[in-house]
Amino acid sequence: MTTFKDRLAEIEERIGQACRRSGRRREEVRLMAVSKAHPVPSIREAVEAGIVLFGENRVQEFESKRAAMGDLTGQIEVHLIGHLQSNKSAKAAELFSGVDTLDSLRLAERLNDAAGKLNRTLPVLIEIKLSPEAAKTGLDPAGGELEELLGRMIDFRHLAMRGLMTIPPLDDNPETARTCFRGLRELRDKVAARHPALDLSQLSMGMSGDFEIAIEEGSTMVRIGTALFGVREVRT
Ligand SMILES: *Cc1c(COP(=O)(O)O)cnc(C)c1O
């Protein structure tokens, strides 16, 4: 049986190769370990192997894990990468180091209020839906809400804009994912030019099956679950 360390070494090797192929430095790409559906001991093993950034997709699941994490909590950064209902904003602002799935103006308002009450600034990424077949969540890049949200970010003093995130449609053809990743980068370049005061430097894209393509297309954060922790028993 392979250990977490073995799997991490293999992923590191592949990230390094993808960076070299695309003329990028390894430091430009953060590795997020997606620990959803895996228990606290798996998170501990990952931390021992050197992982400092984690992704979880459910508020409640992470709330119960965190209660059992003890000393680990202070050593790691955990981002929410699943859809957030605005009625869970307060909990999310309290639990997570960042929310990578901001997908409406209303959610931004709720999160900003919640972060304000906690006297903190919450880093956020806007989730973008780049094709009709992609996951149901995410803002339509062609709709007016994205522009409106970006325009309002200056008022949201407790949110810190960091960039964009996307989940490509499920497709066996890796070129579908490439088109989607490239689309996210181009969208970022376009909106960054319109909003020079905002930090849109982060592009969270790429998972176990397509992270090398995502790095070639400019990803700054790959979200890897299965290839690090093994197959999840429950579908999440
Ligand atoms: C589960 C999940 C991942 C990780 O997917 P793997 O294919 O297991 O690497 C990445 N991003 C999001 C948003 C997820 O929900």
Image (cartoon, helix red, strand yellow):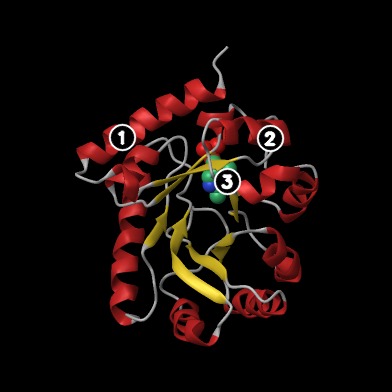
Residue 164: percent from left, percent from top: 43, 63
Residue nearest the observer in this picture, 1 or 140 = 1
The residue tagged 3 is 54
- Residue drawn at (49%, 53%) of the image: 134
Q: Quadrant of ligand 1?
A: top right
Of 27 and 18, the residue lying toward us: 27
Where does residue 178 sit, x and y in percent of width and height?
Answer: 32, 47
Is there CB contact under 8 Å for labels 2 and 1? no
Q: Earlier in the sequence, mark 3 or mark 1?
A: 1
| Cβ at disc 2 under 8 Å from ligand 1 | no
Q: Is residue 184 above or below residue 221?
A: below
Which residue is depicted at the point 31% across and 81% down? 194
Front one among 169 and 67: 67
Amino acid type of disc 1? Gly
Give the distance between the C-alpha atoms of the residues marked 2 and 1, in whole angstroms: 26 Å
In the structure shown, which secondary structural element does the residue marked by tag 2 occupy? loop
Mark 3, ligand 1, within 8 Å: the answer is: no
Question: Which tag, 2 or 1, sits closer to the chain's start?
Answer: 1
The front one of 147 and 199 is: 199
Q: Position of residue 112 (x, y in %)?
A: 63, 78
Tag shown at residue 16: 1
Left or right: residue 45 versus residue 176 is right
Circle number at residue 38? 2
Examine the rendering and report whether any part of residue 18 can be seen: yes
